[in-house]
Image (cartoon, rainbow, N blue to C red):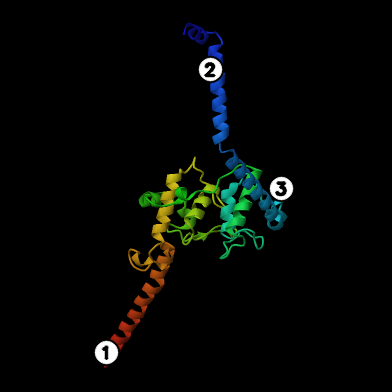
Amino acid sequence: MKKLSARRRHPLAALVVLLFALAVTGGLYAAFSPSEAKADDSSAQSLAIEEGKKLYAVGCASCHGTGGQGTSDGPSLVGVGSAAVDFQVGTGRMPAQQPGAQVPKKKKKIYSDADIEQLAAYISSLGAGPVTPTKSQYSPDGADVAKGGELFRTNCAQCHNFAGKGGALTNGKFAPALDGVSAKHLYEAMQTGPQNMPSFPDTVMPEKNKQDIIAYLDTVNSDKSKTPGGLELGGLGPVSEGLFGWVFGMGAMIVLTIWVAARTAKAKKS
């Protein structure tokens, strides 16, 4: 027992114990670490970038340059991020059919969802930018509709109209109508600021505020039968409503005045 106690008190005993503990820890880490999973993810990402590069070379490079640096026909894509790719290609705006003041949304997108993910992976590899949002980020569930309406009227209604019906801008440009636009694409548009729209990153407009705006648009465009005040007249605002009242209201009053005058004159003659 004395010999064992003396060995325990040996100056190298602590070092031996430490080395043994490190060896055991390293062995356990090597055995249970998800190295294969990480390798698989890296391989899948590399494959997506490679496939996206091929798609880009065929459908995008003629306008945006072989390396995404941009040309006289298209802006640089370095740093736009996967969110911009998902929005532009997912809404059918890109590839553009022809140059113009503004590229409109197409009813049918050209690329599949898998192709869009590969394109986004390649564009993201050119430079960091806004990332495609997850469902939890753009879902309007539990959002504040009243707050969203306030935010929309403050930041968006000048171009898109207070009900999101869109409007004309200068030099042939326009703010598109927002009814029928998916929550994901609305969020991405606020993130990236496509075409003439300013961008609203999370540092300017937090994620919660974006969800509130999406909830507001979903509410005002969800059930047209519940429009307060009767017929909405397209929801285009006081100009269209005033014009409707002037043309039809005044027209009806003029017709009624002529009818009354004619009946009075006829009564006097008789």
Quadrant in the rendering for residue 249: bottom left
Q: Which of the two discs, 3 and 1, labels the residue nearer the N terminus?
A: 3
| Residue corresponding to mark 3 | 67
Above or below residue 210? Residue 264 is below
Does residue 214 appear in this view? Answer: yes
Quadrant in the rendering for residue 20: top right
Amino acid type shown at disc 2: Val
Q: Residue 115 in the image: state x and y as whole percent.
A: 62, 56
Of residues 232 and 64, the one drawn nearer to the viewer in this rendering: 64
Q: Residue at x 42, y 59 (%)?
A: 163
For the residue labelled by badge 3, is the local secondary structure a helix, a strand or a loop? loop
Tell me, for residue 17, which label it has, or none: 2
Quadrant in the rendering for residue 35: top right
Q: Residue at x 35, y 67 (%)?
A: 225
Q: Are marks 2 and 3 in contact (CB under 8 Å)?
A: no
Amino acid type shown at disc 3: Gly
| Residue corresponding to mark 1 | 267
Mark 2–mark 3 distance (CA, rounded to whole Å)? 56 Å
Amino acid type shown at disc 1: Ala
Of residues 243 and 127, the one drawn nearer to the viewer in this rendering: 127
Side of 115 where 14 appears, left or right:
left
Q: Residue at x 71, y 57 (%)?
A: 58
Side of 264 where 170 appears, left or right:
right
Q: Residue 79 in the image: state x and y as whole percent.
A: 62, 44
Q: Nearer the viewer, mark 3 or mark 1?
A: 3
Q: Residue 188 in the image: state x and y as whole percent.
A: 52, 51
Q: Are marks 3 and 1 in contact (CB under 8 Å)?
A: no
Tell me, for residue 97, which label it has, or none: none
Q: In the displayed orientation, state which residue is furthest to the bottom.
A: 270
Does residue 195 appear in this view? Answer: no
Task: Give the class, few, some or many, for how many residues have Cα within 10 Å of label 1's Cα (few <14, many ≥20).
Answer: few
